[in-house]
Amino acid sequence: MIGTGKEYADALFSLTEELGTTEGALSDARAVKEVLSQNPEYIKLLDTPALPVSEKLSLIDEAFGTVDGSLKNLIMMLCEKHSVYFFPKIAKEYELCYNEARGILTAEAISAQALSEDERVRLVGRLEEITGKKILLTERIDKSLLGGLVVRYGTRQLDGSLKTRLSAIEKSLKSTIV
């Protein structure tokens, strides 16, 4: 077993920081993660003991020859350990290392309808003010919220959805003695 992937991500991050290739490695890690998630059969091929390691390493070099060298070496090492399936977790941890080192916090805004550009700018500004970090906002639409907004960042969740407000009113009314 190879753990949580944090150890590999930390080592890769330290190496790419030292080499000055962190941004390129991050971009490549995202691309490789996407390719592997779209091609699970390729992961099985690279992790199978039936194929000689030299052939699998050639396949990696052919498919990922243009990615950051440190990243490609990590993929090859994972292949030798029959653990390529673990790469997406390592890539996610690497991105977390990058974000932490750069003072970036990811946040998710969930709403019943898409935010306007003005709402998005105001929300990002407010979150940056609260956290003191640069915010990378992703948005998701959930029609069941009816209205309002749920924001998740770090370990926090701010729920200002209409659904939650109505549930609180309903609970309050049920507990009221008449």
Image: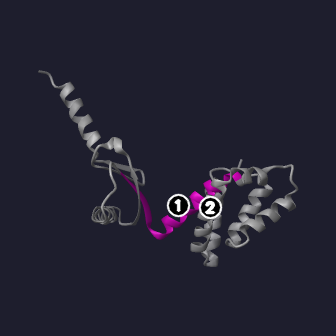
Please name whichever residue, 40 or 18, is drawn nearer the observer in this view of the structure. 40
Whole-Å distance between the Cαs marked 2 and 1?
Answer: 9 Å
Q: Residue 156: percent from the left, percent from the top?
A: 38, 50
Q: What residue is disc 2 on?
A: 9
Is residue 156 positioned above or below 121 on the image? Answer: above
Regarding mark 2 in the picture, which secondary structure is present there? helix
Q: Residue at x 61, y 59 (%)?
A: 34
To which quarter of the image does residue 125 belong?
bottom left
The tag on residue 96 is 1
Mark 1, Cα crowd under 10 Å, few <14 / some 14-19 / many 20+, is: some
The quadrant of the rendering that contains the C terminus is: top left
Q: Residue 91: percent from the left, percent from the top?
A: 61, 60
Q: Report the amino acid beneath label 2.
A: Ala
Question: Pointers 2 and 1 in contact (CB under 8 A)?
Answer: yes
Give the magenta range. 85-110
Q: Residue 46: percent from the left, percent from the top?
A: 78, 54
Q: Does 164 lie within the magenta span? A: no
Q: For the view shown, which residue lies furthest in the bottom direction? A: 20
To which quarter of the image does residue 107 belong?
bottom left
